[in-house]
Image (cartoon, rainbow, N blue to C red):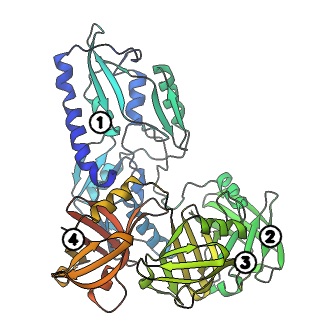
Amino acid sequence: MKKFLYLATYTLLLFGALSLTSCQEEFEEVNTSNTAGVSFKASSETAILIEKTSSRDGSFDNIVDRSSCFALNFPYTVNVNGIDITIDSKEDLELIEEIFDEFEDDLDVLEIVFPITITLADHSVIVIENRAALEELAQTCVEGGDDDDIECIDFVYPVTFYTFDINNTQTGTVTVENDEQMRRFFDELDEDDIVSLEYPVTLIKFDGTEIQVNSNAELAAALRMAKDACDEDDDDDYNDDDFTVERLSGYLVECPWIVTRVERNDVDQTGQYEAYKMTFSETGMVEVKDREGNVLMGEWALRMSDRGVLLTLGFETLVDFNLVWKVCEVGEGKIKLYEEGGNRIIMERMCDNSGGVVLPETLAQILRECSWIIKTVKNQGEEIDRLIGYEFQFQGEGVVTLSNGITVNEGTWEIGTAASGELALLISMGAEPGVSFEWPLRDLTNTRLKFRVDEIDYELILERVCANATDGDVAEIRNIMMGGNWTVASYVEGDMDTTADYAGYDFAFGAEHILSVSTNMDPVKDGLWRVIRDHDGQLKVYLNLGADADVFADLTDDWDFVSITANRLEVKDVSGDGTVTVLVFEK
């Protein structure tokens, strides 16, 4: 499991990598492998291309440091518009973007809490004491994709090298397991040192495709061609999401779009246009269908300007949409349009897994395939925490069950049309009114379903869990958690430590997702627990001990998994205001 076994593995591999120099200096004779390629010098083009490909990419956190030549080491703290946020992972960077994106016309300010530790392109680590030192280092960085590193292709490790003496006699074998070891290996070589590679070598391109190379010439050609094969995103425009006129044009025509927000001249018009469906055609026409099914036709066009990509909409009757809009964000299934003077439109894609319009039978089939776990339920903006982690099973003949591992409620379901005219999931469950509703579909991916009514702030988000799915990390975390009783070793919310509230309580993660709390072996409370990997690929630990006014209600959440050992589990949660809560269980 990468997240919590990485440190131990890395230590062993790094020790091996640092020991390589002494092995080379001893010129240990080994058998020559018949798979070794033609040798080359450490100063050759092939070697330089390998070094560039194994450089550390620092562009992923440009929203923080505004430099692609280095990256801040986790964890560190930033203050975003007055809110302190601890950044523990790449996923946490999205919190910064969400705060920046909340209002398009406000002033966004980010301050880094120094000192910080950063990793440079050559994987060396240094400490930066203040903003001036960071900016001075950033000024030496070449941005815009013109730097030396090659980010559009990567090695598939492990990769084996052979070392040679000046007589071209093989002296050693070196296996590297990651980019850092690769770069350090070449940094330790002198210009005239001779090495060769064991072929075939597998490379993975930016689009996920793998290729095999069988010689130095093929390797150099593949790395050279990859230099400009993709947008390396080496800039500090965090919000561009790498879209161009061509990519955005194709994205718009792939699927219909549902209007979720409209503002004109600082007047909220969402109630008038919400749930309108827009369909863009390749011919430059756009069809808008209102909630009553009436069709309005207009025209659309995209162009690049010094302000970025602009979308022009023109209708005879839909005048609130007529404007030259700046495309300020293209996110996952969402587009935000903005223009000065208080004008904005937000639209969400309505696609099925193949990119087409979602059909009722398609949604019904997807629901029946696996179980679905409740991530979020909102009723008029208020989250119903007591339902977090509950499991839906949509069965044949219109039967649906909702279970927390202890009790099972039964109701009916069907795919129909909401009052707004949209495709919707209709659930009726008298014993659980929190989910009984006409849920209009907003987003559908392979692993997540999102239903929402913006006007009254109703929302249902479901994560898919399939019984036959295999995930080694999930299975390992579950097995460790089920191995005995646990206690709360730490519960810290922001600056408030309430660990003492849980003293004397034992927590047992049992079968059928049942979480039992006891004290001195006397039962106190039962709830549920789950470990899943969500639609973003992030490991989650669901805990639900109800939403009653007791100390256990604070544990009810879909926690972000941090780490686990045989005797320690750490999870965390980041609230909407940036407050970080860390929960630690120990045996």
Viewer-side residue, 101 vs 560: 560
Instruction: Mark 4 vs mark 2: give the one in front.
Output: 4
Mark 3 lies on a secondary structure that is: loop
Q: How many marks?
A: 4
Quadrant holding the C terminus: bottom left
Spatial CA distance of label 2 from label 1 is 55 Å
Mark 4 lies on a secondary structure that is: strand
Q: Disc 3 residue type?
A: Tyr
Mark 1 lies on a secondary structure that is: helix
Disc number placed over residue 89 in the picture, else none: none
Residue pointed to by mark 1? 181
Q: Disc 2 residue type?
A: Glu
- From the viewer's perspective, is residue 279 above or below residue 116? below
Circle 4 Cα neighbour tier, 10 Å, few/some/many (<14 / 14–19 / ≥20): some
| Callout 4 touching callout 3 (CB < 8 Å) | no
- From the viewer's perspective, is residue 157 above or below residue 251? above
Upstream in the sequence, badge 1 or badge 4? 1
Residue pointed to by mark 4? 485
Residue pointed to by mark 3? 276
